[in-house]
Image (cartoon, rainbow, N blue to C red):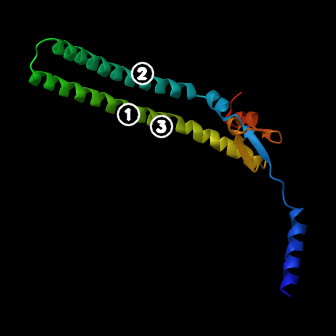
Amino acid sequence: MKKFWIIIVAALLCATTGYAQKAKFGHVDYGAVMKEMPGIDTAQQALMEYQQELEAVGQQMADEFKAKQAEYVELTNKTTSSAILKVKEDELMKLYQRLQDFVSSSEMDLQQKQVELLKPFQERLLAAIKTVAEKEKYTYVFDITMCAFHNDADDLTSAVRTELGIK
């Protein structure tokens, strides 16, 4: 009896697989559409200005470190007491540590600023991709840069551009 039910279930599964809907695949050139979005250039300009501010402060700190380092080297060439050299060396080490901390924190700050500025554009683009995919009944939509091969997939880039109002 158990074998009978297994055979019936297997037969039903085989019969229904022919009626299953075929998965529909598409792709979008995410990067190209992102670059064309209205307002993205303003966000990128703001990000660039923020990066330049951080670099200016970092350069100022590096220049200060180089000046103190040159001063320290000059003192070592003279007959300077070891106590003064130790104070200058400690000062130099603190400046170096401050510079390293600034570089680390500025990298994180820059990444956070990038996320903050670009997130609204990414959300709009993903919403447009989802709208097009649902409208056209696509099962999967991939970023073209992430696909090694896409022969059977449809290019939805122009449909997404239209959805976003990009000409």
Q: Image point 42% across, 26% down: which residue?
A: 50
Residue 27 screen position, x and y as percent: 74, 40
Where, by quadrant of the figure, is residue 152 drawn? top right
Q: Using the numbered discs, state the Cα–Cα distance from disc 3 to disc 1 in whole angstroms.
A: 19 Å
Mark nearer the N terminus (3 vs 1): 1
Three-letter code, disc 2: Gln
Eye-nearest disc, 2 or 3: 2
**Residues at badges 3 and 1 in contact (C-beta under 8 Å)?**
no
- Whichever of callouts 1 and 2 sits on the residue coming sooner in the sequence is 2
- Camera-side residue: 83 or 125? 83
Q: Which residue is mark 1?
A: 104
Q: Determine crowd level at label 2: few under 14, some 14-19, many 20+ residues with C-alpha closer than 10 A.
A: few
Q: Secondary structure at mark 1?
A: helix
- The image quadrant that residue 108 belongs to is top left
User: Which residue lies at the image location 78% right of the left edge and 50% below the top edge?
Assistant: 137
Please name the amino acid that badge 1 sits on. Ser
Per the image, the residue denoted by label 3 is 116
Left or right position of 58 against 8 = left
**Secondary structure beneath disc 2?**
helix
Q: Residue 9 at what x, y percent from top left?
A: 85, 76
